[in-house]
Image (cartoon, helix red, strand yellow):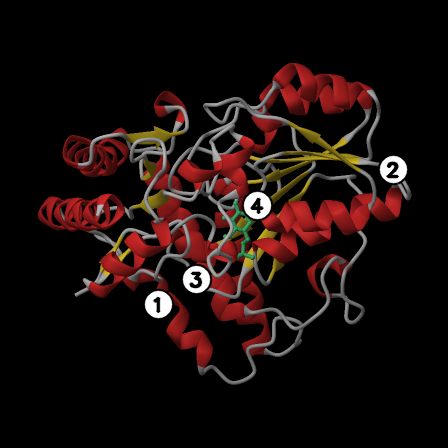
Amino acid sequence: MPLHFDCNATTAASEPVIEAMLPWLGRPGANPSAAHGAGREAARAMRRGREAVAALIGARSPSSVVFTSCGSESTSLAFHSSTAANPGRSNVISTVEHSATRKCAERAGPVVEVAVDRAGALDQGAALEAIARGPAMVSLILLNNETGVISDLGPIGAACRQHGVLFHVDAVQAPGKIAIDVEQLGCDYLSLSAHKFHGPRGIGALYVREGAPVSPLLAGGPQEDGRRAGTENVPGIVGMGVAAERAAELAASPEAQAEIAGRRDLLERLVLERCPGTVVHGDPARRAANTTNLGFDLDGTGLDAAAMLGLLNAQGIEVSTGSACNATQAAPSPVLLAMGTGEALAASSLRFSLAHRETPDSSTQGEIEVGAAAVSEAYASLTLLATD
Ligand SMILES: Cc1ncc(COP(=O)(O)O)c(C=O)c1O
């Protein structure tokens, strides 16, 4: 059985999610826009899903949730909307954003980038200065997909409000890992994607604060209150709702967080003990409990992370060299480089990301030990090769 240490890339839908979705896949007439009984029932199921997603992020009204197809679409909708309302103005992002945000910002117009420090923490002073200059929108990641570093975005949201600047939060990685509160964040938009928290792939959501501009990406019907055309994905919305309920429970459970942190810390400790020179990327004190990003430094030259990944993969151990979206590119992670990591070390780094207990992707303590042993064996054989 493969060991899944790549759960920030995606997670499998949990049993309760699949059970809730299945009836909706084969139900005749389940178009929520239809006026007949089957249509009404679908609309009610969709409403429950919307309420659960709103509750997950502390949204006051379920109608602030717009269902989309994925996190990338949600972020695209936020940028499309803010650009339509503020043509020609710049957008502020950080140097450690996911490619969805980076590409949307580049397409929208001039981009102002705010740096992070060695620990992955945002330069808050530079962000506040950039906001005071009046961009169209600020778009920042809440929980970094590569390092797990969590950003303190409350002050950014407050400054955006003060200066009349729109604020989008990429919270795609946050559900089940930390509590999300759109009021505390002070954001106008917030992106989510169900497949990151044991919901199905093909469904995401964008939170839109009441009064924030919305300019639909798709031309078509009046679905989602005219904000996203296309017949709704009822099975996906039902599944996302069930996944959202569970993610909210997990984020609020100190036991669940301590349990997953315990396995992550065990993996980290065993690898650090057995692989001399290995470093942990990102602030250990402000990190999601499931993620560790390790740089295998060999006398300053580093090991080839792609070769390490190949050796682990041959043993059924799934890890990643960074964002799944860049996994086919040989270049070192732009996120690690932006944190000031040298090229050799960035190219020698692997991300390990675990899933909560009792999920399809979960791993036991014993499996963590097996994984750590495989990492140290791969490290030893690559070290031999490098010193031959
Ligand atoms: C932080 C972050 N933002 C956005 C996305 C894009 O989400 P999706 O794959 O659902 O489009 C991802 C997915 O990898 C992500 O990790």
The quadrant in which residue 155 appears is: top right
- For the residues labelled 1 and 4, the Cα–Cα distance comes to 28 Å
Residue identifier under label 3:
239
Find residue 18 and name its label.
1
Q: Earlier in the sequence, mark 2 or mark 4?
A: 2
Whether the residue under disc 2 has CB within 8 Å of ligand 1: no
The residue lying furthest to the right in this view is 88
Q: Earlier in the sequence, mark 2 or mark 1?
A: 1
Report which residue position mark 2 lands on.
89
Real-space Cα separation, disc 2 to disc 4, in angstroms: 21 Å
Q: Which residue is mark 4?
A: 98
Secondary element at tag 3 = helix
Q: Is residue 365 above or below residue 200?
A: above
Estimate the spatial distance between the alpha carbons at disc 2 and disc 1, rounded to whole Å: 43 Å
Label whose residue precedes the other's in the sequence (1 or 4): 1
Q: Are marks 1 and 3 in contact (CB under 8 Å)?
A: yes
